Image (cartoon, rainbow, N blue to C red):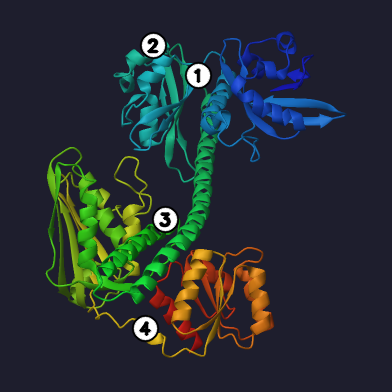
């Protein structure tokens, strides 16, 4: 440790360990300010701590050999004087001062901690050198975590070394999870393939202990090297094992912090996705609403009807993209509708065909009869996309064919139990979809984990795709199975309940107009385009309509007409007062006010805020005119 003032001047204290690590004398260190000894990239961070006289900072201190020693600096003020304590053996405080994206933390925190631990061990064992090797993500190879006192060529030689039952000291210790002591590298068979590397480092003995997590999983190995053949003392092995435990804690802490940062990032993405959904859905509400209104006035045989339908279909596809974003961030809620799944399978496949390698062919064998289903169309598209994409990636750069088929199959209870043992599916007609490739296939141990969250057989994969697919299918009372053989290929089969599709119902907008002539509604919407669509649609349906462009105006209009208003359409996000505040005020004016909330956010997210409040309903924007009038009529009736 070192204890000094921030400015140049005599040191308050420097112990032998620190003196050995940096190589400078007290007189040399006192000749300059603290910041003059700090790495340029870390000076700004430490300056902030010194300016406030409070907190911690991780920064690198120059050594006599022109290397950099990572230290944890703590500043305190007494009698107007800033004193600084620097150490490398007290761990990382929970409130360690750092900037988002700062090089000294974001890229160097763990490696600096490991190097600090190496220096601690070396300072306690003069003449010996220490290194840390960490097991890579594949759990079969090691990477150099820290080895500052060993030659770069040696570290490069052991980088990527595969652990095994007899691979050096560290590779063996990590494989068996036991300490391994090699007293003479030149004679020990564990080092027979690594003696050239040992010669580079000029080491003759190596004592290694495994680095373990709290659950005893092996994270790597920590080793001490001597230039001569030697055996460790009991004290040396005890200290090495204790240091390895501390390293294990540091690694686990780093990984936990990484998970927390990822969680925070996902939370921020969720907020962003919600905002995008609201603004984008408002625009789509105006597009779809005006197209619906235009279709109501157009002649059935007019060619313009087809163009208007294309506008609506394209807009609905755009809303699906918003829903997928919300589903990714955990905000999506299933919106059930009836449709022909055959169309979704074919359309999704054709869309993916353009993005697939030219060497991969996509063939369909689809059922000739419609495959009626009641489900979330966007989520069904997500399932098909995932399976076809996985099949395409299984070929790599090779040539092959992906076969996609659909059919209706009558499953018995016994067949379903075999197909999906942990479900309670009932016998009956199911849609059966299969996606087959003749790619690399998967080993049984991979197949056993393929639906586990965060497990991925692909390099860089998130491991969420198939887990999400299985979750979607279970939510729709369906199931999935996989059959795969290494070198031969993979077949995924999914089943979903089959239903009969009803014929298109008469437009409710046309029927409603004859039955609501005496009803009055209040539309509270700040977006002028959306408000104009809502006013046109409801007036056309025969409603007497009042309007408000912000929260305060909504309260004022309702207060003046509360006894004659049958229903309120209330946008959740409005200026002056938001939907939640307006809802409370309207209920104060009239306890039985029938209020329908409208929002581009999901129903679950909005209604969770109004649980138990007696809200009359929810409309997610954008909404078709028929669905809008259905909701209003149902609330009033």
Whole-angstrom CA distance, mark 4 to mark 1, is 80 Å
The residue sitting at 48% across, 41% down in the picture is: 213
- Judged by depth in the image, the label closer to the viewer, 4 or 3, is 4
Whole-angstrom CA distance, mark 2 to mark 4, is 87 Å
Residue at the disc numbered 1 = 148
From the viewer's perspective, tell me whether residue 471 is left or right of residue 634. left
Give the numbered dot on residue 325.
3
Whole-angstrom CA distance, mark 1 to mark 2, is 14 Å
Residue at the disc numbered 4 = 510
Q: Are marks 1 and 2 in contact (CB under 8 Å)?
A: no
Residue at the disc numbered 2 = 200
**Of helix, strand and loop, which one carries label 4?**
helix
Q: Residues within 10 Å of mark 3 (few under 14, many from 20)?
A: many
From the viewer's perspective, tell me whether residue 617 is left or right of residue 576. left
Q: Residues within 10 Å of mark 1 (few under 14, many from 20)?
A: some
The residue sitting at 18% across, 37% down in the picture is: 397
User: Quarter-wise, where is residue 556 in the image?
Assistant: bottom right
Give the numbered dot on residue 347.
none
**Of helix, strand and loop, which one carries label 2?**
helix
């Amino acid at each position: 440790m070192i204890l000094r003032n921030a400015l140049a001047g005599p040191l308050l204290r420097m112990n032998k360990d620190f003196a050995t690590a940096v190589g400078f004398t007290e007189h040399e260190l006192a000749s300059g300010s603290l910041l003059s000894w700090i790495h340029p990239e870390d000076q700004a961070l430490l300056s902030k701590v010194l300016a406030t006289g409070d907190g911690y900072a991780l920064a690198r201190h120059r050594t006599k050999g022109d290397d950099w020693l990572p230290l944890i600096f703590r500043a305190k003020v007494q009698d107007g004087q800033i004193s600084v304590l620097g150490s490398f053996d007290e761990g990382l405080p929970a409130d360690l001062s750092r900037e988002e994206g700062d090089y000294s933390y974001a890229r160097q925190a763990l490696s600096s901690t490991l190097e600090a631990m190496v220096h601690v061990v070396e300072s306690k064992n003069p003449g010996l050198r220490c290194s840390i090797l960490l097991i890579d993500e594949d759990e079969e190879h090691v990477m150099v975590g820290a080895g500052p006192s060993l030659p770069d060529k040696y570290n490069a030689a052991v980088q990527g070394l595969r652990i095994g039952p007899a691979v050096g000291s560290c590779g063996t210790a990590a494989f068996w999870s036991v300490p391994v002591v090699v007293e003479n590298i030149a004679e020990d068979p564990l080092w027979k393939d690594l003696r050239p590397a040992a010669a580079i480092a000029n080491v003759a003995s190596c004592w290694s202990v495994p680095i373990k997590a709290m659950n005893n999983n092996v994270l790597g190995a920590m080793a001490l090297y001597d230039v001569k053949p030697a055996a460790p003392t009991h004290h040396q092995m005890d200290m090495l094992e204790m240091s390895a435990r501390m390293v294990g804690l540091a690694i686990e802490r780093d990984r936990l912090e990484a998970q927390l940062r990822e969680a925070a990032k996902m939370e921020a993405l969720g907020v962003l996705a919600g905002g995008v959904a609201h603004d984008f859905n408002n625009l789509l509400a105006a597009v779809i609403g005006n197209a619906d209104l235009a279709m109501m006035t157009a002649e059935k045989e007019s060619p313009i009807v087809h163009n208007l339908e294309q506008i609506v279909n394209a807009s609905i596809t755009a809303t699906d993209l918003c829903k997928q974003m919300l589903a990714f961030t955990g905000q999506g809620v299933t919106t059930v509708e009836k449709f022909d799944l055959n169309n979704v399978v074919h359309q999704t496949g054709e869309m993916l065909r353009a993005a697939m390698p030219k060497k991969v062919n996509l063939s369909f064998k689809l059922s000739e009869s419609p495959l009626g289903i009641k489900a979330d169309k966007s989520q069904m598209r997500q399932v098909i996309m995932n399976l076809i994409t996985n099949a395409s990636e299984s070929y790599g750069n090779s040539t092959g064919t992906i076969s996609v088929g659909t059919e209706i199959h009558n499953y018995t209870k016994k067949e379903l139990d075999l197909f999906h043992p942990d479900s309670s599916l009932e016998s009956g007609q199911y849609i059966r979809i299969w996606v087959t490739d003749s790619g690399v296939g998967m080993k049984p141990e991979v197949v056993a984990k393929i639906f586990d969250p965060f497990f991925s057989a692909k390099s860089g994969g998130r491991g969420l795709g198939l887990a999400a697919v299985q979750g979607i299918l279970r939510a729709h009372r369906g199931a999935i199975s996989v059959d795969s053989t290494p070198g031969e290929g993979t077949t995924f089969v999914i089943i979903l309940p089959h239903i009969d599709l009803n014929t298109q119902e008469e437009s409710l907008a046309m029927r409603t107009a004859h039955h609501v002539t005496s009803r009055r509604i209040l539309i509270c919407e700040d977006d002028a385009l959306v408000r104009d669509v809502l006013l046109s649609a409801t007036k056309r349906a025969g409603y007497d309509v009042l309007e408000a462009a912000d929260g305060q105006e909504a309260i004022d209009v309702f207060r003046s007409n509360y006894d004659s208003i049958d229903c309120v359409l209330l946008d959740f996000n409005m200026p002056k007062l938001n939907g939640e505040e307006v809802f409370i005020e309207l209920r104060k004016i009239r306890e039985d006010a029938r209020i329908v909330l409208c929002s581009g956010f999901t129903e679950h997210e909005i209604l969770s805020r109004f649980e138990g409040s007696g809200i009359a309903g929810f409309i997610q924007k954008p909404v078709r005119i028929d669905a809008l009038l259905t909701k209003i009529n149902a609330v009033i009736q």
